[in-house]
Image (tube, rainbow, N blue to C red):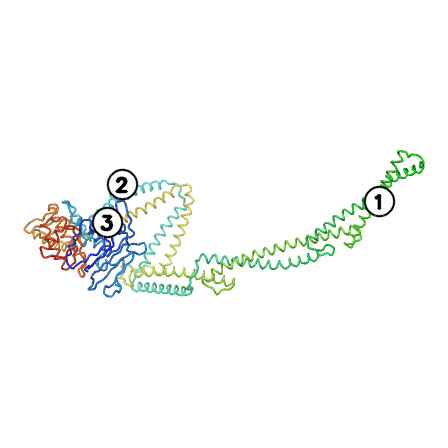
Amino acid sequence: MRIKRMTATFGSLDHETLELEEGLNILTLPNEGGKSTWCAFLRVMLYGLNTRERDKKGFLADKTRYQPWSGAAMEGELLCSWRSRDILIRRYQKGSTPLGGFEAIYADTGTPVAELNADNVGDVMIGVSRSVYERSAFLGQSALTVSQTPELEKRLAAVVSSGEDGVSASQVSDTLSDWRRKRQYHTRGAIPTLEGRRSELELALDNARDVTTQIRNSRLNIDRYEELRAKLKHQLDLYEAQSASAQADAYGRAAAELKQAQEQLRKLEEQVPESGFPPKKALEQGRDEVALLRSVDAGLKQAGKEVPPAKAALERAQEAARDDVFSGDAATARAKAQEVRRNVEALKRQEQTAGRNRWLFPLIFGVPAIGGAGCALLLRGGALLPGCGAAAVLAVLAIMLGAVWNGKKKKCAAAIQKALADCHAADLGAVDAHAEDYCARLAEADRLRTELEQFEKTEADLNQQRQTHWTNLRTLVDTFAPEVKDVFGFSAAITRALTLLDSLEKAEERQENAQRLFDAVAAHGKGVAGALAEQPAMPLEQAQAGFQEAERRLNQYHNELSMAMGYSSAKGGAEAIQAELESIDQQLEHYHLDYDALGIALEALEEADAEMRNRFSPELNRRAGIYLSQLTGGRYAKVRLNREMEAGAEERDGVATRDVISLSRGTADQLWLAVRLAVCDLALPQDEPCPLVLDEALVNFDDQRLLPALELLGQLSQRRQILLFTCQGREQRTMDERGGHHAQ
């Protein structure tokens, strides 16, 4: 792979372009001129931008750090040669996501590169992950600055043992050993602590006196049947592993069951409409709605039976309330009848009063009037006596009152006659009875009208409820059975849907179980079995029946034990202690498993570490030695990384190897550069060499050491493109003096 051009709107770069050549490119840029930005841009174009990374105190995520200073959208292009063709890679803003858009096309045709996408560009084109590329092909000043401390040895140990700068096999081994010590050997370790507590609980359990006979017997029976179950399970295991044919049969049965389960599920799924079914809960609610609709229909049917008779009864009552005397609307007729009754009562009182006073007025006023008249006749010629005058006045009043009374009597008689005539009655009692009967008929009509209105209201409410339930069911069923037109159809469709969903759940469960069984059988092979050292001691059917019976008895005795312990737990004591013991046993089992697992992991790690060192270290030493010899002008010919991962360099004519801590700062930097270049050779694919990027990697090299380093990089650039970013001009000047290389 070779990079030809990079165009970036990224951080301080604003639509800037960097043209690159084959071989060694010395890119001279001032401080703050974009060297590290171009390096970061290249990594992002190859491996993408981590948009999930967040800013922290003292740290800026790349999406924030490299937000374009110009305010423009973050974007870029990378033109490179890969597999003998030019490929143009673009990343651009997509919505609010910086560099969320991606495109990879062939530069000559514009057609997409099928095997490349936003997530795999670096993995496919470079051939390694981002972390491996950064730790091998990306070299910065910090990667070569090593003080005279064991730091270099630690870094080398990490690279050789784990492939990463920050993690070494020795570190992992130390961590595992520490975990293992804390579990077993430390006085305060988990296992000794738990075992001590368990001893205390066992002592307390021995002192408990409230354990019942049933509990003891249940436990004895459980132990007995656990042992029996274990023996029977062993017999079944022998039959399971008896022969290859048995295993093959099991595999065939599992495969057949899986196929049947899949076919059953497929047929059931074919019955599901394209639109699918509503959720099961909605269907269950629909089923309840059908029941409510049927209940409403029953109510409507009953209302349909009650309303017509009520209407007929009201019509009969209204017909009975019609009267020639009391005509008009009901309110007017009722008022008229009530007025007639009041008038009849008044006429009756007047008639009675007239009868009592018929002789009273003549007695009161008549006698004095006669006496007065006599005195007037006798004393016609003389003056009237005072008494005679009064009598005369009384006589006049009597005559006047009599006339008034006779007028009222006649008026009352006329009113009575009119009332009798209007009602076609013989007397006032009949008139009153007629009016009272009419009022009663009106009251009955009112009662029947109220009853009919209540029936009609009930019917209207039921119709409203029916419409609501119908609409809900119509909306629900239309999604999967629009052809349904009645309540029976609603019920049948919902029932079919629920039945089908239940069948689908069972079929899915069957398929899952069949898949698990198939996977378990397949994991043991399709029928590979050796000769058994032990043969089954009983027929298979007997072992199966006995195992099932032991399981049934164990469940029975476990239930009995639980019930007995539940009874005694109210008093406390052994049950609580037993529960804590069981919990501690589980924890001990967990920690013992951890302890054993950590031991196994340590052994595996040591074996893998030794294998990696034996396989990787000699080649790493050889390649690093070649590069170190070139860098030091042959003074140091070999690099040594021993089994303890101690680093050193051997002088050409020297007998002993000098440890890194005894080397000068400059030589240590040369050693580290040689090792990193060797790691690149071993870690990176060689069929399509990726570019090597150095960001101020040689800034601490003096002039004497700079020239060999540049010459070595020039040699490596014949098979791998190298980008050397620097803020100084001495690298380019040095190369110009030696024949020249491209610079910017």
Q: Where residue 169 sits in the image (x, y, percent)?
A: 20, 50
In front of the other: label 3 or label 1? 1
Cα separation between marks 2 and 1 = 136 Å
| Three-letter code for the amino acid on which mark 2 is drawn | Arg
Q: Residue at x 38, y 60 (%)?
A: 510
Quadrant of the snapshot with the C terminus:
bottom left
* Residue 127 % position (x, y): 21, 59
Kindly state the secondary structure of the residue where label 1 is placed.
helix
Identify the mark nearer the N-term, 2 or 3: 2
Report, in whole angstroms, how far the alpha carbon at label 2 lies from the one at label 3: 20 Å
Question: In the rendered structure, are the residues bearing label 2 and label 3 in contact, judged by CB atoms less than 8 Å apart?
Answer: no
Viewport quadrant of the N terminus: bottom left
Q: CA distance from mark 3 to mark 1?
A: 143 Å
Q: Out of 701 and 383, give the one closest to the viewer.
A: 383
Say left or right for 258 vs 346. Answer: left
User: Residue tagged by mark 2?
Assistant: 188
Q: Secondary structure at mark 2?
A: loop
Q: Residues within 10 Å of mark 1 (few under 14, many from 20)?
A: few
Inspect this view and state whether residue 453 appears: yes
Report which residue position mark 1 lands on: 403
| Residue located beneath label 3 in the image | 599
Q: Residue 231 lies in what quarter of the image?
A: bottom left
Residue 642 in view here:
no
Q: Residue at x 84, y 44 (%)?
A: 403
- Residue depicted at 26% across the width and 48% down the height: 60
Q: Position of residue 367 (x, y in %)?
A: 89, 39
Apparent side of residue 487 relative to residue 391 in the rendered image (left or right): left
